[in-house]
Image (cartoon, rainbow, N blue to C red):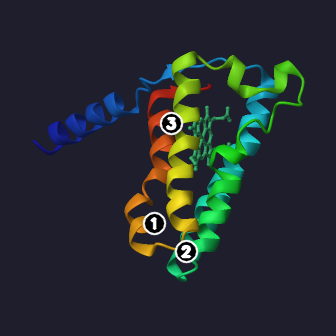
Amino acid sequence: MRAFLLIAAFLAGQALAEDQRQLALLPPAAQESLREEMLGNLLAINEILTLMAAGKIKEAGLLAEASLGQSAQGKHREKPFSARPGPHMPPAMHSIGNDGHVAASEFAKAASSGDREKALALLPKLTEGCVACHYSYRTR
Ligand code: HEC
């Protein structure tokens, strides 16, 4: 019985380990640009949460707009085509990215006005795009 349970648990783990996400093949240079941007995203989220916890709502809003909002779009525009992630993404993936910037700006707008309640209510907007894309796509 014990062995059976162990095998069942192992098989369940295997099923979960199988990656069902769609593979988006990006040129190596574009992957590198994306990775750099992503690490910046992670840092920004952490800083924004820290500011929110400290009651620095307006500062959190300004940082969110500059780092994750629509103001942060187009930062790869000057790079060679092969190093720009956006144009190499499947259109639906690119849309998730664009929507994420719009959502972050929604939070940023509320926070920049200093409205704590509204900013808190919109806080999950900062991460919904991250989750949507990461659960649908992989690059390797
Ligand atoms: C449009 C799709 C998309 C969105 C939106 C997105 N990511 Fe990513 N992210 C990726 C892909 C693809 C990779 C893998 C890049 C690679 O090839 O290494 C990645 C990688 C990462 C990594 C790993 C970097 C490393 O160390 O290699 C982190 C951390 C990360 N993303 C955080 C975030 C956060 C935080 C957000 C939201 C603010 C976010 N991502 C939004 C697609 C996305």
Q: On the rendered structure, is 103 left or right of 75?
A: left
Q: On the rendered structure, is 111 left or right of 12?
A: right
Q: Secondary structure at mark 1?
A: helix
Give the amino acid type for the residue marked by disc 3 in the picture. His
In percent of the image, x 71 and y 39: which residue is there?
73
Q: Earlier in the sequence, mark 2 or mark 1?
A: 2
Query: What's the CA distance linking mark 2 and mark 1?
Result: 8 Å
In percent of the image, x 44 and y 45: which residue is there?
128
The answer to whether mark 2 and mark 1 are in CB contact below 8 A is: yes
Quadrant in which the C terminus appears: top right
Q: Nearer the viewer, residue 13 or 98?
A: 98
Give the amino acid type for the residue marked by disc 2 in the picture. Ile
Instruction: Say which quarter of the image contains residue 50.
Output: bottom right
Q: Which residue is mark 2?
A: 57
Residue density around tag 1, few if under 14, some if 14–19, many if 20 or more, within 10 Å? many
Q: Which residue is mark 3?
A: 134
Quadrant in which the N terminus appears: top left
Q: Which residue is mark 1?
A: 119
Instruction: Say which quarter of the image contains residue 86.
Output: top right
Percent x, y for residue 62? 66, 64
Q: Secondary structure at mark 3?
A: helix
Give the amino acid type for the residue marked by disc 1 in the picture. Ala
